Image (spheres, rainbow, N blue to C red):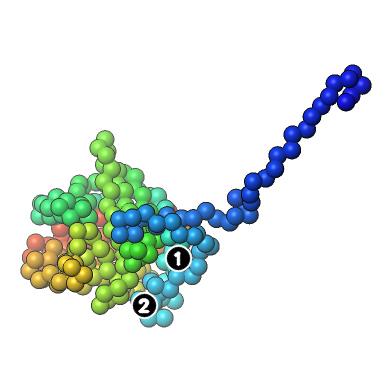
Amino acid sequence: MDGGGSIHTVAVLKRSGPTQSERGPPPALDLCDRGRGRLVAAGPPVSDARFSNLFARDAWASLPEAVRRRFSVQMAPGEAKHYAGEIIETRLSFAGRCLAHLARLVGAPLPLAEATSGHALTTVQEAPACGGQIWTRMYARGRRMPQVIQTVKRFSGPTGLEEYLGYGLLMRLTSRVEDRALVFRSAGYAVEIAGRALRVPPWLAPGDCTITHRDLGGGEFRFELVLEHPVLGVLIRQSARFRD
């Protein structure tokens, strides 16, 4: 009560539980759990040797530190890394354009249109239920909706690394270091049926795929993809620059 005879009351709020900081990081969502969302506990990043184990020790050590860092941090399930950038070039031959549109039947894993500029975004997300990482690439296409390409890098198979393209189709990859750049080359294709991987005959394969990750310094890197057929020549050539 104050001098004027008024009575003041003070409301005391009782905490119903620990604060967010006391509870720790929220659970993360694993987006690839055989079609069912799955909440798992999120934790701090840990060292990831899955990529480095694909290379000889000297070869891995010869890579720029920035490259080794990008491929050595394992994220909690559901966490993601984002790399924004720009398309430098996308070229398709007539046969390459036909192949890209035919591949829409298995999720459109190839660029559908030529370009010499445009925004690009790559997202890498940890997905243990898929056996690796979900790689999502988004490419602007002028006034049209951007194209979204989604694949899964799995650390399995005879080469230790394969790119799952969707609908049972996968591409096996070899891993090398060339001129201080990471180079992944296709080493055959397979189709998964009833848990078994059946090899695609070479005469049915779309060609040899080469993917290069080259550090440019200053937190930037260049991504290059070349798909070359032994008879039809280069079908698709794509290059883009990204930033950490």
Identify whether 65 is placed above or below 111. Answer: below
- Location of residue 208 (image quadrant): bottom left
**From what the image shows, is residue 159 above or below residue 122?**
below
Q: Which residue is tagged 1?
A: 74
- Which numbered disc flags the more N-terminal residue, 2 or 1? 2
Residue 54, given in percent of the width and then of the height, sits at 35, 76
Return the residue nearer the eye: 86 or 167: 167
Q: Tell me the quarter of the image containing the C terminus.
A: bottom left
Label 2 neighbourhood size at 10 Å, few (<14), some (14-19), many (20+)?
some
Q: Secondary structure at mark 1?
A: strand
Q: Is residue 200 visible?
A: yes
Q: Is residue 193 above or below residue 137?
A: below
Front one among 235 and 136: 136
- Quarter of the rendering occupied by the N terminus: top right
Residue 202, position in %: x, y? 10, 71
Q: Can you tell which quarter of the image residue 241 is in?
A: bottom left
Residue drawn at the location 30% of the way across and 56% of the way down: 35
Q: Secondary structure at mark 2?
A: loop
Tell me what residue is drawn at x 36 percent, y 49 percent: 121
**Residue 93, percent across and down?**
13, 53
Residue corresponding to mark 2: 55
Residue 110 picture location, percent across and down: 21, 54
Q: In the image, which is nearer the foreground, mark 2 or mark 1?
A: 1
Q: Name the residue located 13 percent from the left edge and 63 percent from the top edge.
A: 206
- Dot 1 surroundings within 10 Å: few (below 14), some, or many (20 or more)? some
Q: 60 and 151: which one is in front?
A: 151
Q: Is residue 135 visible?
A: no
Q: How many marks?
A: 2
Which amino acid, by three-letter code, is at mark 1?
Answer: Gln
Q: Between 198 and 121, which is closer to the camera in this rendering?
A: 198
